[in-house]
């Protein structure tokens, strides 16, 4: 609720934004792990 207030969003919008951000971070981590497993070049962000 505090984050939503501080960013001038309603709580539903803030929750969706945080979930999408978390999924993006998760996707990058999975890509890095796949690259390490395959022995290819590491993904650098």
Image (cartoon, rainbow, N blue to C red):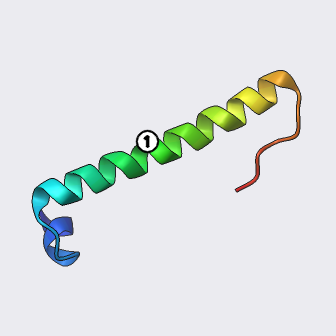
Instruction: Locate residue 40 relative to residue 27 in the image: left or right.
Output: right
Instruction: Locate residue 29 relative to residue 26 in the image: left or right.
Output: right
Residue 36 x %, y %: 79, 30
Closer to the camera in the image, 5 or 24: 24
Residue 9 x %, y %: 16, 69
Residue at (51% x, 39% y) in the render: 26
Q: Is residue 14 above or below residue 43?
A: below
Q: Which residue is mark 1?
A: 23
Residue at (61% x, 32% y) in the render: 30
Instruction: Locate residue 17 relative to residue 6 in the image: left or right.
Output: right
Residue 19 x %, y %: 32, 46
- Mark 1 crowdedness (10 Å alpha carbons): few <14, some 14-19, many ≥20: few
What residue occupies the far top of the structure in this picture? 37
Residue at (88% x, 32% y) in the render: 40
Q: Is residue 34 above or below residue 1?
A: above
Residue at (12% x, 59% y) in the render: 11
Quarter occupied by residue 23: top left
Quarter occupied by residue 4: bottom left
Q: Is residue 22 above or below residue 37?
A: below
Q: Secondary structure at mark 1?
A: helix
Numbered circles on residues, count = 1
- Quadrant holding the C terminus: bottom right
- Quadrant holding the N terminus: bottom left
Residue 31 x %, y %: 67, 35
């Amino acid at each position: 609720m505090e984050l939503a207030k501080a960013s001038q969003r309603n709580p539903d919008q803030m929750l969706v934004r945080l979930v999408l951000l978390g999924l993006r971070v998760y996707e990058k981590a999975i890509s890095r792990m796949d690259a390490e497993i395959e022995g290819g070049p590491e993904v650098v962000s």
